[in-house]
């Protein structure tokens, strides 16, 4: 069985911890980073196919990060998770390439469902 | 509305007092520049002042200049009374900070109309100030909500993890369910508050003056 890997980007450690616990509990391999810059470094070495990105990041924000990921790794499926709904509009996110958009506090079950859905899609695309 | 009349001429003062009182305004009188200045330094000072140009103590334009240089809490509408000779100095008066002028001998109808203009401008300034205050509050509310959503996510997440780990029959199950439910309630609140802040953002982005929308959405929230 192919390893299913998820990359989580959030500048708050406690959020990284809870998301890591939730995704690994469901059987995924999780890596967490605290900035967009770090995320891009990781993607250059081992591209992840499923990502969950906080939008309000220090340095480069999550929307710009998604734009770059969409450009360089178009097969990656990214999900926006933000605590600041008014600052980042959904259509800006969709334009940047986000698959979906969640506002904190989000139900872990919703994130797990999104991850499952994303991996199913990737499987389907592989078999086309 | 309270109006200040400043003129060293007793007759002019009396006549102005009479007509303004007739039109329903509350009056404060000053007989020279210093009295006028002091009257406008009070905490409940008039917001509209009719200042004679030539006065002992401080001239009308001098008062205007000093007032505009002050840091004041509320708006101030200044009308200068000018005589025939001083009409060339209208520019000086306006540049000194007067909002309008009325030439002596003044036409009563014109004076009434110009005072009404001043009243309208003051009303607009008050409205603007209120709106700015409200926008400040909304911006802060948005920022606070963002801060709250972070720990909220953590608590909600752990409550959800606990619920996944234990059986429904577990004696603690109901407690954790309760914790998550209430945390989610707070989450709904922060979402609602940020919705209101969002209307403000749409204002600027759309370029349309959706001031009415802000009022509508905040009154919805005040319920």
Image: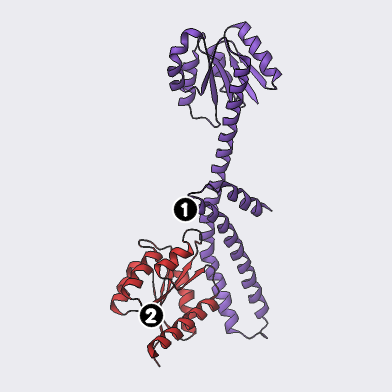
Chain colours: A red, B purple
Q: Nearer the viewer, mark 1 or mark 2?
A: 1
Image height check: is A43 above or below B66?
below
Residue wearing tag 1: B205
User: How many numbered marks have been drawn onto this rendered protein structure?
Assistant: 2
Image height check: is B79 above or below B202?
above
Chain of the residue under label 2? A
Q: Residue at x 51, y 62 (%)?
A: A85
Left or right: A37, with B31 as reference point: left
- The answer to which of A91 and A23 lies nearer the viewer is A91
Chain of the residue under label 1? B
- The answer to which of A45 and B216 lies nearer the viewer is B216
Residue A49, quarter of the rendered image = bottom left
- Spot occupied by residue B146 in the image (x, y as percentages of width and height): 51, 60
Residue wearing tag 2: A49
- Spot occupied by residue A33 in the image (x, y as percentages of width and height): 38, 72
Camera sees residue B123: yes
In the picture, the disc for residue B184 is none
**Mark 1 closeness class: few <14, some 14–19, many ≥20 residues within 10 Å:** few
Q: Secondary structure at mark 1?
A: helix
Image height check: is B54 above or below A42?
above
**Mark 2 closeness class: few <14, some 14–19, many ≥20 residues within 10 Å:** some
Q: Residue at x 43, y 22 (%)?
A: B95
Image height check: is A92 above or below B206?
below
The N terminus of chain B is located in which quarter? top right
Residue B132, quarter of the rendered image = top right
Q: Are marks 1 and 2 on the same chain?
A: no
What whole-number distance in Å separates the C-alpha atoms at marks 1 and 2?
Answer: 33 Å
Residue B152, quarter of the rendered image = bottom right
Q: Residue at x 47, y 23 (%)?
A: B97
- The answer to which of B162 and B15 lies nearer the viewer is B15
């Amino acid at each position: 069985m192919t390893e299913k890997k998820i990359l989580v980007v959030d500048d708050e450690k406690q959020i990284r911890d809870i998301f890591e616990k939730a995704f690994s509990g469901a059987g995924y391999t999780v890596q967490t980073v605290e900035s967009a810059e770090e995320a891009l470094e990781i993607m250059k070495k081992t591209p992840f196919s499923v990502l969950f990105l906080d939008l309000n990041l220090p340095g480069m924000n999550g929307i710009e990060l998604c734009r770059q990921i969409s450009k360089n790794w178009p097969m990656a499926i990214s999900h926006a998770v933000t605590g600041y709904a008014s600052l980042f509009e959904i259509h800006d996110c969709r334009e940047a390439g986000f698959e979906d958009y969640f506002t904190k506090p989000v139900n872990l079950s919703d994130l797990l469902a999104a991850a499952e859905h994303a991996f199913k899609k990737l499987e389907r695309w592989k078999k086309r | 509305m309270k109006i200040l009349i400043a003129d060293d001429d007793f007759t002019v003062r009396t006549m102005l007092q009479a007509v303004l009182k007739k039109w329903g305004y509350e009056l404060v009188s000053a007989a020279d520049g210093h009295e006028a200045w002091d009257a406008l330094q009070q905490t409940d000072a008039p917001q509209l002042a009719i200042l004679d140009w030539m006065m002992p103590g401080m001239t009308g334009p001098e008062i205007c200049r000093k007032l505009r240089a002050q840091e004041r809490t509320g708006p101030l509408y200044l009308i200068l009374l000018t005589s025939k000779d001083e009409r060339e100095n209208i520019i000086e008066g306006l540049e000194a900070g007067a909002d309008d002028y009325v030439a002596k001998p003044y036409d009563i109808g014109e004076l009434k109309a110009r005072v009404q203009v001043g009243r309208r401008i003051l009303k607009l300034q008050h409205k603007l100030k209120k709106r700015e205050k409200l926008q400040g509050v909304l911006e802060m509310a948005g920022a606070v909500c963002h801060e709250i959503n972070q720990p909220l996510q953590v608590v909600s997440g752990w409550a959800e993890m606990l619920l996944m780990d234990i059986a429904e029959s577990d004696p603690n199950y109901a407690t954790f369910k309760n914790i998550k439910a209430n945390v989610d309630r707070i989450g709904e609140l922060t979402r609602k508050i940020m919705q209101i802040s969002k209307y403000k953002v749409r204002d600027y982005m759309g370029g349309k003056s959706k001031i009415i929308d802000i009022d509508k959405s905040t009154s919805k929230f005040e319920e």
